[in-house]
Amino acid sequence: MAKYKCCNCPLYDKCSIAHFEVYGGVLAYSSDIDSYNECNIYIACWDSKNITECIKSLLEQHEPLL
């Protein structure tokens, strides 16, 4: 069962843009993690100079989303 609503993540807007640009669709609404601090995308990209490009790069490499 989903625990964390992805729309509460501080990177949600940038993550949604990246998902749309890579997949042509919207980001998942929720995940089975407890906090965005457990999200692989957040961990990898939160301090990047260009967060959207960082996320797009992860998505294009088929990294696990959460």
Image: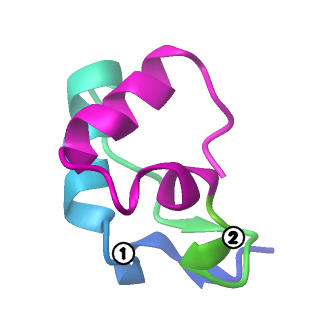
Q: How is the image coloured?
A: rainbow
Could you tell whether 25 is left or right of 27 in the image?
left
Which numbered marker is on residue 38? Answer: 2
Please name the residue shown 36% across and 75% down the image: 7
Instruction: Name the residue at 46% across, 71% down.
Output: 6
- Where residue 61 sits, quadrant-wise, is top right
On the image, the x and y values in percent for residue 13 come to: 20, 62
The residue wearing badge 1 is 7
User: x and y percent of residue 31 in the render?
Assistant: 65, 66
Residue situated in front as seen by the camera: 57 or 12: 57
Q: Amino acid at mark 2?
A: Glu
Q: Is residue 65 left or right of 42 when viewed as pictured?
A: right
> In the rendered structure, does residue 45 fall within the stretch colored magenta?
yes
Residue at 26% of width from left, 37% of height from top?
18
State the extent of the magenta-drawn residues as a range: 40-66
Total count of labels: 2
Circle 2 — which element? helix
Instruction: Check if residue 5 falls in the magenta segment.
Output: no
